[in-house]
Amino acid sequence: MATATPPIPPRAYQPVAGLLSYLVPGLGQILQGRVAKGLLFLICIYSLFFYGLYLGSGAVTIGQREYRLSSNVYLPDTTDPTTRKGPLQNLGSNLYNRPQFVGQFWAGIVAWPAVYQYLKYDRDKHQEVEDLYSNAERVSDSDPPQAGQLREQAAEKEKHLSLPLLGGFEREPPQSCINAVHNAGDKRLELAWVFTVIAGVLNILVIYDAVAGPAVPTRAPSENERS
């Protein structure tokens, strides 16, 4: 007479491992003892993410000004200045205008600089810098000395706007910078964010794997195996 197949033991969920795999892809699996799988997740997701950052960065010099993009992972403040309440109050509308960040955020702590830059971003001060550069370009032919002074003022203000350690990394770039670099580059700049979004979305699956464990749970031993 055939023996009945023993029931599969209940799955033990591990939310702490899921949190660790959110912070650093694969870290939860590594601490669970699934080192090879965790390292595979880490290498694959970070390769996609940082390759996307590399493709989405660039610099071009037009006239006397250098336009530079440091990354395509950022959250912009796109709300109307007359209705702006604050970064957290306007978060929903800003995510609506750049939904890519919803996917990029799940890549873990590598996307956190964008959140910090968003919270610290002062649109009015950055607009002052852009106005100085624009005025310098406007008078560059008629009054070169004044144009040079305006550029120095803009560079000094821009320097003070850079955050410690991060600088301008994962900060919303000015629209003039986006236009200049994209017009001087190729289509890869416009598609680079796809790699970072895929990395973030894939890490959601990694987080689930860390929380729920392997897809095929360990089978409980039968009576014959225990004897």
Image (spheres, rainbow, N blue to C red):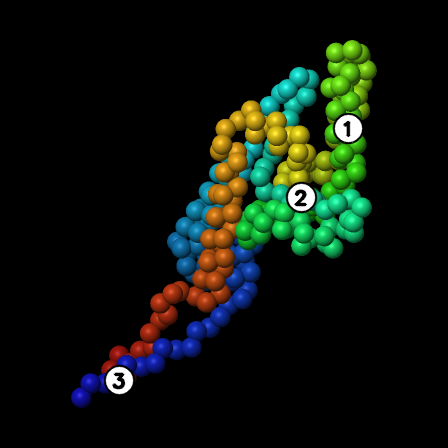
Image side of residue 98 versus residue 131, left or right: left
Q: Where is residue 214 shown, x and y percent of the image? A: 40, 65
Q: Where is residue 23 shown, x and y percent of the image? A: 56, 54
Give the amino acid type for the residue marked by disc 1 in the picture. Asp
Label ID, residue 4: 3
Give the amino acid type for the residue marked by disc 2 in the picture. Pro
Q: N-terminal of the two: label 2 or label 1? A: 2
Q: What element carries label 2?
A: loop
**Residue lying farthest to the bottom in this orientation:** 1
The residue lying at 67 percent from left, 43 percent from top is: 76
The residue lying at 66 percent from left, 39 percent from top is: 172
Q: What element carries label 3?
A: loop
The residue lying at 39 percent from left, 53 percent from top is: 36
The C terminus is located in which quarter?
bottom left
Q: In the picture shown, does residue 157 fall above or below 89?
A: above
Q: Where is residue 118 shown, x and y percent of the image? A: 69, 46
Residue bearing the label numbered 1: 131
Q: In the picture shown, does residue 95 fall above or below 180?
A: below
Can see residue 31?
Answer: no
Give the amino acid type for the residue marked by disc 3 in the picture. Ala
Residue bearing the label numbered 2: 76
